[in-house]
Image: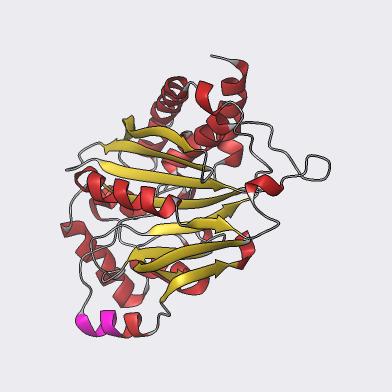
Amino acid sequence: MVRGLLVASGLALALSASVPVVAAPSRAPETTQASFEASLHPQSGDISVSDARAVLHLGKDYYFLPADDAKRVLTQVWGNPPDSVSDVLGLILPAGKTAFDNVWGAVVTFEDTGHVSDADAGSQDYAAVLKNAQDGAEASNAARREAGYPAVHLVGWAQPPSYDGTHHALIWARNLAFDGGKVNSLNYDVRTLGRTGALSLNMVSDMNSLPKVRTAAKTLSERVAFVPGATYADYDASIDKTAEYGLAGLVAAGVGAAAVKKLGLLAIILAFGKKFFVLVIAAVAAGGRYLFGRIGKPKDPDLI
C-alpha cells in the first residue's frame, strides 16, 4: 500500500466525522406524529448554510430542516444518541416525504479538514482503501459483540468512489451487512470540497433503495455551492490550512473502523426489518428512552 494510503488509514480513527444517519422508522401514533411535524420549519429553494459558507440549491425537489429541527429528528425520531449530532447543520429530505416515512435523509455537516487537493484524482487506489477498511471493521467486531451489537461487515462498494472535478464533489457508497440482518444497509457519502474543508451529506438506507439513493446523491452533489471567497478555487496556499492527505484519505476517514461502528442505532435496526421500528418510535413517544430489544443495551455508546 502506498504511503499516502497508510497515512489515510491512520487518519480514519482521528478524522472520521460520519454522522450516524439512519433510515426513518414506521409511523408513530398519529397525534404524536402530527404535533411533531407541525413543530418543524421546512425550507425549500436556495438554502444558506452559513456555518459552511455554502448554499444548497434544492429547488422544489427537496426540502431542508435547519439544525435544531434536524437534531430533533435524528435523536427523537431516528434514535441517534444526542452527543452524536452536535455538529449537524441541517437535514435534507425528498419533497412530499416526512421524517416518519421509510425514506433516506441527507445529514448536512461541514468538515474543517483544511484544503483537500484533488491533484491526484485520477490515480487513487480505492481498492486498497476498501481492503483496509474491511480489515478494520472485522477487527472491531469482537468489541461490538461484547457490547451487545451484531457484527457488521463491509461487503464492498455500493458505488466506488468517483470524483466530479466540475463540482469538486467526491461520492462513494458502502454495502454493509449485519449478522442476522434481513437486508444489507446502504451508506452514501457526498463530500463537496471548498476552500478550507468539505461540506458533507451522509445518507443511510437499504440496498433495495440503491437506485433512488444513487440518483439523489448525484443530484444533490450538483446543487451544493460555496459562496464567493469560500470556493475551491479561492484557496490560497500562503494563508489557508492544507489537509495532509488527498481524496483517498478523505474516503478512508469516512469508511474506516470508527465510521463503521458509529453508524447509529437505527442503521442496525434497519438490517432487522420494520417490526423493530415500531418499538423505537413507541419508546420515543413514551419519553425518549431507547429500546434495544433483542440487540440488548450497549455497554459502550461509542460502539453504536
What segment carries the magenta color?
30-34
Which residue is located at x 78 percent, y 39 percent? 237
Q: Residue at x 42, y 33 (%)?
A: 161
User: What residue is rendered at 35% in x and 44% in y?
Assistant: 187
Work out whether residue 14 or residue 225 is closer to the camera in this orientation and state it: 225
Q: Position of residue 119 (x, y in %)?
A: 61, 29
Tell me if residue 136 comes above or below residue 177 in the rendering.
Answer: above
Q: Is residue 302 left or right of residue 177?
A: right
Residue 33 highlighted magenta (yes or no) = yes
Identity of the residue furthest to the front in this view: 166
Would you place residue 42 above or below residue 85 in this image? below
Indicate left or right for 229 with 37 as reference: right
Q: Nearer the viewer, residue 239 or 288?
A: 239
Q: Residue at the location (40% across, 63% down)?
A: 92
**Residue 259's x, y, as percent?**
47, 41
Depth check, front residue: 38 or 84 = 38
> Does the rendering let one see residue 296?
no
Residue 210 visible from this viewpoint: yes
Q: Is residue 112 above or below residue 249?
A: below
Q: Position of residue 153 (x, y in %)?
A: 32, 32
Magenta region includes residue 101? no
Q: Quadrant of residue 60?
A: bottom left
Image check: 244 left or right of 158? right
